[in-house]
Structures are given as C-alpha cells and as structure tokens.
Image (tube, grey):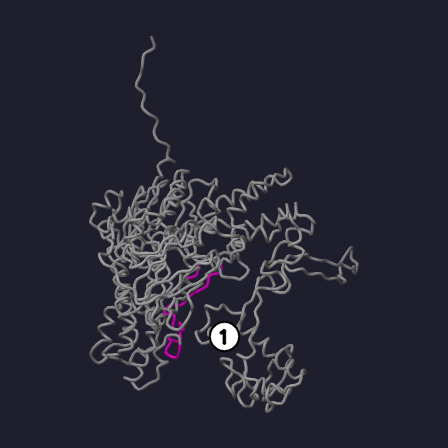
Amino acid sequence: MAKRTDTQPPAPHAADSHELIRVHGARENNLKDVSVEIPKRRLTVFTGVSGSGKSSLVFDTIAAESQRLINETYSAFVQGFMPTLARPEVDVLEGLTTAIIVDQQRMGADPRSTVGTATDANAMLRILFSRLGQPHIGSPQAFSFNVASISGAGAVTLERGGRTVKERRDFSITGGMCPRCEGRGSVSDIDLTQLFDDAKSLSGGALAIPGYKPGGWNYRLYSESGFYDPDKPIRKYTKRELHDFLHREPVRMKIAGINMTYEGLVLRVQKSFLAKDREAMQPHIREFVDRAVTFTTCPDCEGTRLTGAARSSKINGISIADACAMQISDLAEWVRGLAEPSVAPLLAKLRHALDSFVEIGLGYLSLDRPAGTLSGGEAQRVKMVRHLGSSLTDVTYVFDEPTTGLHPHDIQRMNGLLLRLRDKGNTVLVVEHKPEVIAIADHVVDLGPGAGTAGGTVCFEGTVEGLRAGGTLTGRHFDDRATLKAAVRKPAGALEIRGATTHNLRGVDVDIPLGVLAVVTGVAGSGKSSLVHGSVPAEEGVVSIDQTPIRGSRRSNPATYTGLLDPIRKAFAKANGVKPALFSANSEGACPTCKGAGVVYTDLAMMAGVATTCEECEGKRFEASVLEYHLGGRDISEVLAMPVTEAEEFFGTGAARTPAAHRILQRMADVGLGYLTLGQPLTTLSGGERQRLKLATHMAEKGGVHILDEPTAGLHLADVEQLLGLLDRLVDSGKSVIVVEHHLAVMAHADWIIDLGPGAGHDGGRIVFEGTPADLVAARSTVTGEHLAAYVGA
C-alpha cells in the first residue's frame, strides 16, 4: 500500500504578490501626505464631501501617474504629439496598472460633432453604405459630412533619372458634406437691422455693433473707405455701393496713413463674432450675437448635413441620414435584420456598438444628436460605450460619478456594469456620493473630514459595514432619508406650457406652479430638460442655471468668476487714491516677471513642463509697489488668500466695509463654499465646487423664477441638506424654484412633482404624474413613485 506523505503547498509565485496599489505621501492640491492601499481586481469607492480631495487622489495622482508612465514607453517623436503630464506630488506609487479614465468632461461642442462621430458608429455605417448602398456613389468619404467634395487638375514637375519631367495630374475627392451649410445642418442668417440703422448715414452713427464706436478704427474703416459717401443715408445707396458696404471681398487700403484690410461688413462680422465659441464671449457681445444672428435648418440638406447624392444611396429603402436619425434601439433592430456575408464582421461590430448603447441606457439617443447637447451624465456614458465588452483585463477603470444624471431606476443598471467590469479581473475605482453605489463597494476610502484646507486626509478605509459604524461624516449620513413634508406650500400662480414638442415631447400641456418648490423628474431621456429649457418662455425674470460646466484658466479664480474682484478693486483704489487696474493680477498690477501668474512655466518639449514659484513676487502675483497699498490693514494678495468666511467678516464691518463685496461673499457662504480662498485657481476646483460657485453667481440675477438643472451633481449627502435649506430660503423669499432632479431627497422635499416618462426617447415625452410627493408615494403608479416610496420607507 502506498504511503501517504504530507507535502507542503507550493510557495506562492512572486508575480502573485502584487495585489495592492500602494500610495504613500500624496500631496496633490489639498492632500496632506495621504497614504492608502487599494486592493486590485476589486471595486473601490472614494467618498467624502465635495472638495475633500477625492479627485486629487484618484485622478490627479493615481490615474495621472499611470498615464504618464504609459506615455513614456512611446518614442520621443510620438511623445511630442501627446499632452505632457508632470509627475504628481507623491513619494511612492507602486502596483499601478494601465488606467482608463471615464470622466465627466463634457464632449466638445463643435457643431460637426455628433453621438455617431464621437463613438465610431458613424464610421462603421459609412463603410456599410459604401459597400451595400444602391446606387453606389463612392468610398466611405462620400457619406461623411466632414469631408467636402473637391477636384483639381494641373501640371506637376518630377525629377526622374536625372531629367526634369512634367506630367499632367488630376484628382477628385467625393465627400458627403452639404456645400450650403458645410456639414453643420443649419445656416446662419444675419439680421441686417441689428448691424446698422439704414435711415442714418455712417457719419451720423449708423453702425450698432459692439466695438464700432464713431471715431474708432473699426468705424473709420467704413466711413473713410471711399467706396461710398459717408454722409448719405444707407438706404439711399446704389446696388454697387451696398454690395461694397456689405459683401466686398478683402482689399488692402490706407486709412489715415495706416495700412488696413477692408472687407464687407457682413464678412467682417462673421469672422469676428460667428467664428468664436458663444460661451466664451463677453455677455454684451453674446447678447448682440443672439439678437443679430438667426439659425435656421439648412434648406438644401434639410438638417441632415449630407449632400443629395449621399442621401440617395439606400439599403432596403433606408438612407444613411434616415439611419442616423433613428432612435439607436430601433437602428440596432434594423442592423440585426441585415444578413450580408460579404460584410459580416462589420455588421457584428456595429451590432455590438449599438447594443452597448441600449445596455447602458442610451438607446433613446440618435446618432445625429449633436454631442454638445448631451448632459454630463449622458456624455460620460457615451464614453463608456467603447469599454463595454472590451477583452482587456487587469486594467484600472477610473469613473467620476458615473450616476450623474441617472434616475434611481437606472442606477441599478449602472451598478451591474461596474460589477461586470470588476468580475472580468479589472480594478474599478469610483468617485461617488450616492449611497446606492457605495453599498456595492468591496472597499471604501473616505476622505475629509471637511473640504478644502479642512480636508485632504483619509478618515476611513475598509468595508461598507465598517463605514456605517465608523462615525465619519459619510458614515453618519449614509442611511439618511429625507421625510415627506407634513404640509406643502400653496402655489401663487402657474407657468402655463401648451403643446410642447421639443425633442421627444408629445404635445405636452402642463401648469408648473409658481411660488413653491416644483421638481421635474423622470428617467434619463424622458424629456425633463426639453420641457424646462425648451418650453419655459425665456422671459424677463426667468433665471436658468443649466449643466454647462464653468470654464476658466489658471488665471481665473472665485473672485474673478463671481464678479467679487470688481468691488474689491474699487474699494482698494478709493482707499489709496489710485486706479483700480493696479489691483488686478491680469492687468497693470501684475508682477512683470511672471505676468501675474504667480509661477514661471518652463516648457521642456515632450518632457513635462516645470512650474516654479516666481522669485520676484514669491507667488503673490502682484508687483511690490501694489502690495504697499492697504485696505483695513491688509494688502490685495492677503485679501485673495482669505477664505470666504473670513472675507465675509472682513468686508462686512470696520474700515474695509464694502456692501457689494459682502453680498457676493454671503451668497458663496450660503451654498457651502465658506472654506474656498478667493484667489484659488478655478482649475483646482472639484465638480461639486464649480456647480455651487455657478449657483452662487446666478442667484444674484434679478428674477422671480429660478430653474436649476440637477443642482445636486457632485454634492455629498451632507451637502444636499444644505442645498435643500438654500432652496427653501429662495422660495420663502418670494421666488419660484423649478428643479430638474433625480435625487430622492430633493423629490421628498418638494411641494409639487411633475414626473415624465414612462420610458426614455420615444417611450417617454408624456406627463405620467402631477401632484404632491405624498400622492406620488401613495399611488406608486410610476417608476419614480416606487423608488420614492422605498426611499421614505412608506
């Protein structure tokens, strides 16, 4: 009989010992020497109040270093074309894997960018139509609205066998771009009555364009051009004179001895105003553009952006324009019905891409939807489409609040996707505030205890059960549930909407009550934003705060963005008898060495640039002479280094009392930004902080109706309570507040709920409930009603 011997299990392989991502001594932004160990191939959720350092740890440290190390594996030539990344402020980072970042950055709002072009679905459709479309019209380029048709011919000179040879060559490219609207789908008409008053002459001040003041160079270019009589009223110009005035091609000429380029007024306005991004314009110029320019659907392509030839080529009676206009869930069905062996691999790939859209809850979009019109949550999920079904394993997926813009009903589906990515052997890192997502975590890292300088430390690491019992701010609020109001406010009137048909709305008639807190809800894509932004008349007194993110360079800060710096500069100037421009780091007061940036940047080509604190001003951004002027015993750099709460006290009483500044600071404190310093660059603010800064700025606008689109985005459970208090104060002060929201605490707190649905896209667009939250819970007739009932424990 064989004798049994107890053998030792084999020693673990050295390669299996790297089971953790180790971070030691992270100091990015407000992190205070943070050290954490994150398990690999698990789902780790990072929580903490808005501004506690979650994004600084996950995005600016772990993900940034992973990307930087991958970029370094490419040749110096390739690195020259890539964004240069500096090494994060951290002592040790071990065990990193390739990071795939799915952040909340909005997609580019380029007019030619659509859902289809952003996800490769259009590229596959173009190949499909170039192979199967009848009549055949050309290569995939012939179906692209980004490629113009061009042709040319001429002689080319070649060196061949020591002789110079001339040959005739011609070429042509058949593109799909509609020549009239250049692939934009809409054409802009300029309303000439907004540019000038034709009853006046140029000498009499006919032009009404910002920056065209009589006597200025822009004005003299026209009044002294010599093409027409400047003393004659414009309406009396001959055809030739009017053409020269409005549409003349550029021509060089001398005016008052200076060389200038003259061109027709319409051409000049198009170049100087219409070529710029509307959001980046100053308010008075944006107002002029909105008045002077009307956008209408292109009559040639009917808004499809494509040439007639591209629309004439069809598969089973469907053109590429029809396919892109279909709801994606319907398009997926149509593609499934195509069985053509010659393009089988292409059809399989296209089917997978379209099914991923449906799976992630975006089946209600169409491929021709402009990318700039997607909400933050939709844009983030569109970016996720390409990672679903990927064969990669052992990579780190990094998500920034993937549930933004999702109804509680959709959050369960998103949780399923996150767990599937983990179960394939990937490390999933999620920055999130919603308790439903925190609950599915394998590991939780809670940062805090506060925000800004009061945050930046790890308060808790461990399991969800441990977090609940841990006593941190997140742990204490984890099981918070808002209760339904005992008594709701009575409306003081109603905002009537009749026959609303924007996007997927089906002739909606609704009365939104005024003088109360009204919440518009429904699943993502049910038509909430279409109803509120598309149908509420933009009259005087309606202040609309949408989801567009704050734009700002490192020179922008809360003081410049909110307009707070203006009264501060004036107060300093008045107290010291000098001009206000001295107290701006972007104007005359700037340090001459660093031009007011506070740091000197050294560009090292494909290596990461180096930023060193300016030695001249020691990072204060102002020249030394400016810092000698004081207000209430403080210089301008000391004021910009104050937190909002301290500044509110400083400008509220005493020698520095400035009511205009104090009012703005009070609003910033109201939205919970008391810890921000006035001079902190906007680029270092978190998503939730930017959202609240925008809220504080818009609250000042005069208006009786405030429309807020998802104000809880990026807010911690504890911050939501403060937001509800702010909304109550707004309503109690006599304003009407309409909130588009998915957060159950806001719904429970509402006086009136309007629920859209029942589904998304063409399954939505109808009102499925109107009434008080208590009635919605009692009826449980909608998806929202069921979730709200479960939330309040009814």
In the picture as drawn, the residue positioned furthest to the bottom comes out as 231
Tell me, yes or no, if residue 33 can be seen here: no
Mark 1 highlights which residue? 291
Instruction: Give the total number of marks visible in the rendering.
Output: 1
Q: Quadrant of the N terminus?
A: top left
How far from the left and from the top, in percent, is residue 515?
A: 30, 66
Q: Quadrant of residue 748?
A: bottom left
Magenta region: which residues? 587-611
How far from the left and from the top, in percent, is residue 315?
A: 64, 46
- Indicate yes or no whether the magenta region holds residue 593: yes
How far from the left and from the top, in percent, is residue 271?
A: 56, 73
514 or 425: nearer the eye?
A: 514
**Circle 1 sits in a helix, a strand or a loop, which is it?**
helix
Residue located at (63% from left, 39% from top): 340
Residue type pointed to by label 1: Arg
Q: Is residue 118 above or below residue 152?
A: above
